[in-house]
């Protein structure tokens, strides 16, 4: 029986040399596939409830957001109203801020206006670089 | 001096190879460390249509300092997976804020929610004292406009 006597050449050990590669591969795989949904948005600091400030009318500019998404611009002192699309708000506010850096952008939103219209205008106001923003709801 | 020269010739007994047999253990250790230390937020995702804004910023705040308020299209408000009536928002926020003064409240509202609802929430937040708020948005990619 010469076959039975043949010497076994195959090693009976599990190869451990590539174990590190496998482990690192797993590590890198999990590192790259993990997605953290990062927090994004428009930050704003609300005024404390007690603090109400008196502001002179000339430092105010009102952006009144209508339910259909158009914006009525009203400068503090004048009664003049100007109806614009929300995309024009940035340009208008930029010009106003150049003249008066203390200007407060007051967003008055109609209670029935969709949230997105308000965010659109807030976006424009932020883009114009306004530091002082006030959020209000339009009282009928 | 002669002795020193002899020292140079001495055969080193230490192997010059980096031992690779423990590499697997190190790698698995790292793997297990990251697996254990990763904490996932348990909150369920609500179905909302996001609002978009071009000036969306990344909020650099620790995960544990952020509280989500979800407002669905029909106006229902969820805080930590629970429906909250509008009048109770400040009562819910107040103890959370008392525990963590660095709290940032992220309002995740549906784009079609009437602003009245959002305004009620911000008023309630003011009443609770949590004044750091973000309106959670998605980045808007608009066609580049000519910028002066």
Image (cartoon, rainbow, N blue to C red):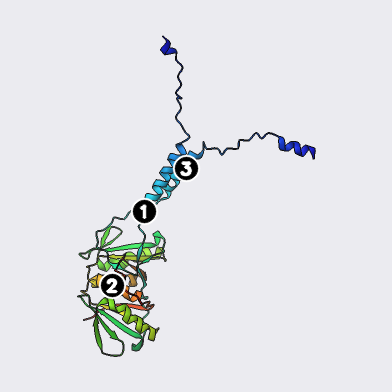
The x and y percentages for residue B38 are: 40, 50
Q: Are marks 3 and 2 on the same chain?
A: no
Mark 1 or 2, nearer chain start:
1
Q: Position of residue B105 (x, y in %)?
A: 35, 66
* Dots 1 and 2 on the same chain: yes
Circle 3 Cα neighbour tier, 10 Å, few/some/many (<14 / 14–19 / ≥20): many
In this view, the residue in front, A61 or B87, is A61
Q: Is residue A61 above or below residue A12?
A: below
Quadrant where the image shows the C terminus of chain A: bottom left
Q: Chain of mark 2?
A: A
Chain of residue at mark 1: A
Query: Which residue was labeled with disc 2?
Result: A120
Q: Quadrant of residue A70?
A: bottom left
Query: For residue A111, which quarter of the picture?
Result: bottom left
Lateral position of residue A41 relative to residue B84, left or right: right
Q: Which residue is mark 1?
A: A35
Q: CA distance from mark 3 to mark 2?
A: 48 Å
Judging by the rendered image, the residue that carries numbered circle 3 is B27
Between B143 and A21, the residue placed more toward the observer is B143
Q: What whole-number distance in Å separates the C-alpha atoms at marks 1 and 2? A: 28 Å
Determine if marks 3 and 1 fall on one subunit.
no
Q: What crowding class fits label 1: few (fewer than 14 Cα within 10 Å), some (14-19), or many (20 or more)?
A: few
**Coordinates of residue B27 in the picture (x, y in percent):** 47, 42
Q: CA distance from mark 3 to mark 1?
A: 21 Å
**Disc 2, SS:** helix
Query: Which of the chains bears the disc numbered 3?
Result: B
Would you say the residues marked 1 and 2 are in contact, meaning their CB atoms lie under 8 Å apart? no
Q: Residue at x 37, y 83 (%)?
A: A97
Find residue B60 and report its image quarter.
Answer: bottom left
């Amino acid at each position: 029986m010469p076959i039975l006597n043949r010497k076994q050449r195959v090693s009976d050990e599990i190869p451990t040399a590539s174990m590190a590669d496998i482990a690192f591969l797993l590590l890198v795989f999990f590192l790259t596939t993990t997605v953290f949904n990062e927090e994004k948005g428009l930050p704003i600091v609300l005024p404390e409830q007690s603090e109400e400030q008196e502001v002179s009318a000339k430092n105010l500019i009102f952006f009144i957001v209508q339910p259909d998404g158009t914006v009525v611009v009203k400068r503090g002192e004048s009664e003049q109203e100007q109806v614009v699309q929300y995309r024009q708000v940035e340009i208008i506010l930029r010009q106003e801020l150049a003249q008066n850096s203390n200007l407060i952008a007051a967003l008055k939103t109609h209670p029935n206006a969709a949230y997105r219209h308000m965010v659109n205008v807030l976006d424009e106001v932020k883009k114009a670089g306004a530091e002082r923003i006030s959020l209000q709801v339009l009282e009928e | 001096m002669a002795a020193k020269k002899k020292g140079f010739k001495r055969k080193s007994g230490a192997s010059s190879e980096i031992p690779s047999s423990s590499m697997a253990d190190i790698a698995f250790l790292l793997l297990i460390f990251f697996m254990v230390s990763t904490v996932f937020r348990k909150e369920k995702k609500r179905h909302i249509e996001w609002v978009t804004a071009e000036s969306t910023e990344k909020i650099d705040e620790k995960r544990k300092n952020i509280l989500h308020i979800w407002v669905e299209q029909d106006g229902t408000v969820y805080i930590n997976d629970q429906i909250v009536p509008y009048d109770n928002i400040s009562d819910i926020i107040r103890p959370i804020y008392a525990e963590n003064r660095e709290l940032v409240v992220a309002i995740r509202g549906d784009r079609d929610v009437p602003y009245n609802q959002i305004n009620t929430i911000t008023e309630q937040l003011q009443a609770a004292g949590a004044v750091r708020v973000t309106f959670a948005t998605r980045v808007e990619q608009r066609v580049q406009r000519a910028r002066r």
